[in-house]
Amino acid sequence: MRAPIGSFEDARPATERKDLLPPTVAGAVTSDMLHVDTDPAKADTADFVATYGADLDGCSANCVVVAGKRGQDVTLAACLVLSTTRLDVNGLVRRHLGVRKASFAPMETAVRETGMEYGGITPVGLPVGWPLLVDAAVAAAPHLVVGSGARRGKLIVPGPVLAALPGAVVLDGLGIPVPS
């Protein structure tokens, strides 16, 4: 099967690759999602684009786990923005979650709570009840590369499918352009 973006040698429906996915992700993939086998050493965006296709520049999204605090209460949420942007964690995320302080969750917390590998966290198969904040540009994209829950492999998912995941709320301006 040929992937709609990138130059991947091994692309298959994610529902056929559940053995390569963490259990939480395997239980949540749908027929709208493709799994592509990738080298975990090429996971950083620049190396990934150089290895798997220049057409991927701007066609990938990062899923970031955020911890919002109000007093002693901590709210964990996932945020999905284009990899060419940075997350507005102290503005839009903080306000949307209704917390006094928002920051990136510690790696140990993100891994423990999601059941996924650091560097491969995906919006697919997040814990029940978690908010998933999705940038409007992600929701509008025809296809995006996102993590698969593991460092090896990625998922290719249409933006509208990502915007329809459990707990998803689409927000304009969640991803802020990075100055060049």
Image: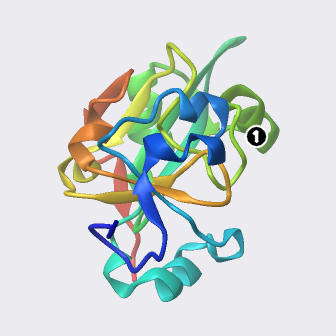
- Residue shown at 66% from the left, 38% from the top: 22
Q: Quadrant of residue 134?
A: top left
Rendered position, 98 above or below 176 = above
Q: Residue at x 35, y 29 (%)?
A: 165
Residue 6 visible in image: yes
Q: Residue 135 placed where, x, y %?
A: 31, 45
Please give the name of the residue rendered at 45% of the width and 19% of the height, measured from the top-left corner. Answer: 98
- The vertical placement of 68 against 123, above or below, is above
Quadrant containing the N terminus is: bottom left
* 16 or 168, nearer to the observer: 16
Say which residue label 1 marks. Answer: 106
Could you say where residue 141 lies in the image, as x and y percent from the top left?
A: 21, 56
**Image coordinates for residue 112, horizontal then vertical, percent:** 77, 30
16 or 108: nearer the viewer? 16
Quarter containing the C terminus: bottom left
Q: In this rendering, would 38 be left or right of 59?
A: right
Relative to residue 9, is residue 146 depicted above or below?
above
Q: Which residue is drawn at 19% across and 57% down?
A: 142
Q: Is residue 10 left or right of residue 54?
A: right
Question: Residue 8, how many percent across, how many down?
Answer: 44, 75
Residue type (three-letter) at the residue carrying disc 1:
Pro
Left or right of residue 117, residue 56 in this image: left
Residue 172 can be seen, yes or no: no
